[in-house]
Image: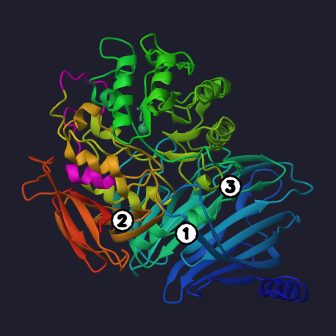
Amino acid sequence: MSKMTIVVLLSVLLFSACGSSKSVDLLSPNGEIAFNLEVNENGQAFYKLQTNKNQIFSDSRLGMELHEDSLFTDGLRIINVVRNEKNENWKPVWGPNETIPEKYNELIVSLKNHENNDLKLYVRLFDDGLGFRYEIPQQNGIDSINITKELTEFNFAQNGTAWSIPANFDSYEMLYRTTQLSEVPDANTPITVKMESGYYVSIHEANLTNYAGMTLKNTGSTNFQANLVPWPDGVKVKAKGSLQSPWRTVMLCKNAADLVESNLIQNLNEACAIPDTKWIQPMKYVGIWWGMHLGVETWTPGPIHGATTDNMKKYIDFAADNNIQAVLAEGWNTGWENWGKPRAFDQVTPYPDFDFDEIVSYAKSKGVELIGHHETGGDYIFYEESMDKAFSKLHDNGIRVVKTGYAGPIPNGQFHHGQKMVQHYRKVVETAAKYHLMVDAHEPIKATGISRTYPNMMTREGARGMEWNGWSEGNPPEHHVILPFTRCLGGPIDYTPGTFDILYKNRKNYIKWNSNDKGNSRVNTTLAKQLALWVCLYSPLQMASDMISNYEDQPAFQFFVNLPADFEESKVLAAEIGDVYAVARRKASNWYIGAITDENAREIDLDLGFLDADKKYVATIYSDTENTSLNENPTEIKIFKKAVDSKTKLHVKMQNSGGQAIEIREAEK
Ligand code: NOJ
Ligand code: CA
């Protein structure tokens, strides 16, 4: 008899003997994290989370309020507990690592309320954190489910430093606040906390499917409660028959590097649902994009229209010459003149100066892929009507990637992050899979690991990305050293690093088009940091964001030329949230390192102990110089080679908001 069967049998025996239990415990596989579920005398359910040294969450409420007959708030009793465990490795189609360990202990707790309605709680404890989800199983007496409130709480046992963005229901494009946890009024997830005890905790959700996005609300001191994004009528989640919530996730690590290396979110998603994944391939890309954000080109036709046949050909040639697989064109299709109006964008008709067929055949002749672009302005209703037509146009022309956009309000009082839009974003991914299309979503729903199930969901924005540098005061230096520990814990980010003309010295005759533009726009990093961001901010569709004219005669661009689009192994080398981040990624026997700092200049030593001890290597180093300075001289960079091996401690010197990018290859014998 297996160990698992014995555990299951024991719990069944235990429960048939006592009839009902009030408390259940679960330990992580390494025994260091303990979860406890308790139902009090009023039938209210609470959980606690602790390590063998510290309390993480004190009593935190569980349950949900339904606005029909049945309530899963009070009067609950535990009627059965099943225990399982899993210890397996799986292989993603792409990702920063080629193998992912999945090891957890599980509890499945069946509860009943006063009226004998059933609620199930699934709890999984990993060595790096917790996931739990609710299920309302199909049952007599519950037909339509309308959740008016999820009671889930995360009551931190101590204060700490928190990195959070506000709980906006329409946008994640905000700057992170670094505050005491107790001072966070509300937040979107992931929210990351360094507790006073030193533990790093990040709260998020996994497998957000047919449910509303979760935000958090401070209910006093360091206590937080789930606050789901509502429908226009105030109901949070609507379902027929049965329902499963997303997993509520709590990463729990001893240091910030372990947060980044955690696979908790992906592990709480279902296995791949696409049988043939050969058409799904990571790519690097450039595109007709930055010129519009800078105000020197337009999405609409006219004298400075960006997406013209000639311009596209230049981008295709550039991609072909520089080991870049794909080219994006925005403003290729009619409708941009109606941006903001309903049914604005026609996703199939090109503008007259964009010869679609000619561009498709030119790209093909050069061995370069095209990335289709579908801005919707938020009009998901019209997009759903057009989707099949629009996707087959791409597919029929051999196009494998579509970038989507929802820049504008969602019709009929819906929010970007509510259940309706969660359904829509998923519909796009599933329909795209049918047409063998990979998706890069802007103004998306947050990343919750669904790429495990739908690996054509490659990357998404969902953060203040590069575009903000074009027409606002820009993203501050600390932004890049917060993202890996917050937004990026959910999954890949289409931040689009790689702007080389940092102070916009080459920008001539620009036309202000965005109301956030106060005339002080720039990129708030050095050039070396831009290179490093290509490694630090992982994306299986990785863009070099600048206009290609700004890459001419730029030796530093060689780093992007050589960079692979995907990796086999990744190791975090330095990590302190909001201060510093360095990561090394391997493809075959080559390694690529990105190191970045906040507004402070910094020196760090990178231990190259991960290199093969029997081999000699050469590092090509792209570094800030003594004279590089964020304000006056951000683009100065030095590129040099250095012999390294597994014993090397590489001394990395970064200027304010600087960085370093390193390519390590085996030395020729
Ligand atoms: C916002 C997106 O983030 C950006 O990448 C795109 O260029 C514009 N919307 C227009 O679609
Ligand atoms: Ca955006």
| Residue lying at the far left of the rendered structure | 627
Disc 2: which residue = 583
Q: Where does the image place residue 223, in percent across and percent down from the top left?
A: 51, 68
Q: Residues within 10 Å of mark 3 (few under 14, many from 20)?
A: some
Does any portion of residue 328 appear in the rendered image? yes
Q: Magenta stretch: dominant SS? A: loop
What range of the chain is rendered magenta? 508-533
Which of discs 2 and 1 lies nearer the camera? The answer is 2
Q: Is residue 579 above or below residue 299?
A: below
Disc 3: which residue = 272
* Residue type for callout 3: Cys
* Residue type for callout 2: Val
> In the structure shown, which secondary structural element does the residue marked by tag 1 occupy?
strand
Residue 215, by quadrant, is: bottom right
Label drawn at residue 250 = 1
Kindly report the distance in space between the C-alpha atoms of the residues bearing marks 3 and 2. 27 Å
Q: Is 516 in the magenta?
A: yes
Q: Are marks 3 and 2 in contact (CB under 8 Å)?
A: no
> Taking 445 as reference, is 508 left or right?
left
Earlier in the chain: of badge 3 and badge 2, it is 3
Q: Is mark 3 within 8 Å of ligand 1?
A: no
The N terminus lies in which quarter of the figure? bottom right
